[in-house]
């Protein structure tokens, strides 16, 4: 069958991705950027990858691409 917790983990993941979408954020781009940068970041840089701060730095780029 499958892991008994898989459904709950899947629901959490879909909820997170949908919340990004509702804010106009590309979930794939965010997760990829965070997971790429996180290993080399210091705890003083973590504020850069908080969703709201990350989105602020990307929105001007997204508007230029439109």
Image (cartoon, rainbow, N blue to C red):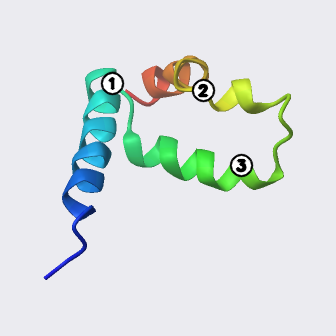
Mark 1 or mark 3, earlier in chain: 1
Quadrant assignment for the N terminus: bottom left
Q: Position of residue 61 (x, y in %)?
A: 54, 26
Label 3: which residue? Answer: 37
Q: Position of residue 8 (x, y in %)?
A: 23, 52
Q: Residue at x 21, y 67 (%)?
A: 4
Q: Residues within 10 Å of mark 1 (few under 14, many from 20)?
A: few
Tell me, yes or no, whether the two marked residues, 1 and 3, touch with CB atoms within 8 Å. no
Mark 1 or mark 2, earlier in chain: 1
Which element carries disc 3, helix, strand or loop? Answer: helix
Number of the label disc, if any, that sits on residue 24: 1
Number of the label disc, if any, that sits on residue 66: none
Q: Nearer the viewer, mark 2 or mark 3?
A: 2
Q: Position of residue 35 (x, y in %)?
A: 61, 53
Which element carries disc 2, helix, strand or loop? Answer: loop
20 relative position to 35: left or right: left
Residue found at the far front of this picture = 4
Which element carries disc 1, helix, strand or loop? Answer: loop
Q: Residue at x 30, y 28 (%)?
A: 19
The front one of 61 and 40 is 40
Label 2: which residue? Answer: 50
Q: Quadrant of residue 20?
A: top left
Q: Residue at x 26, y 23 (%)?
A: 22
6 relative position to 37: left or right: left
């Amino acid at each position: 069958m499958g892991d008994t917790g898989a459904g709950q983990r899947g629901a959490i993941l879909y909820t997170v991705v949908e919340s990004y979408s509702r804010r106009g954020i590309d979930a794939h781009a965010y997760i990829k950027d965070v997971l790429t940068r996180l290993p080399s970041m210091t705890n003083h840089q973590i504020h850069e990858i908080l969703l709201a701060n990350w989105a602020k730095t990307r929105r001007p780029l997204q508007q230029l691409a439109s």
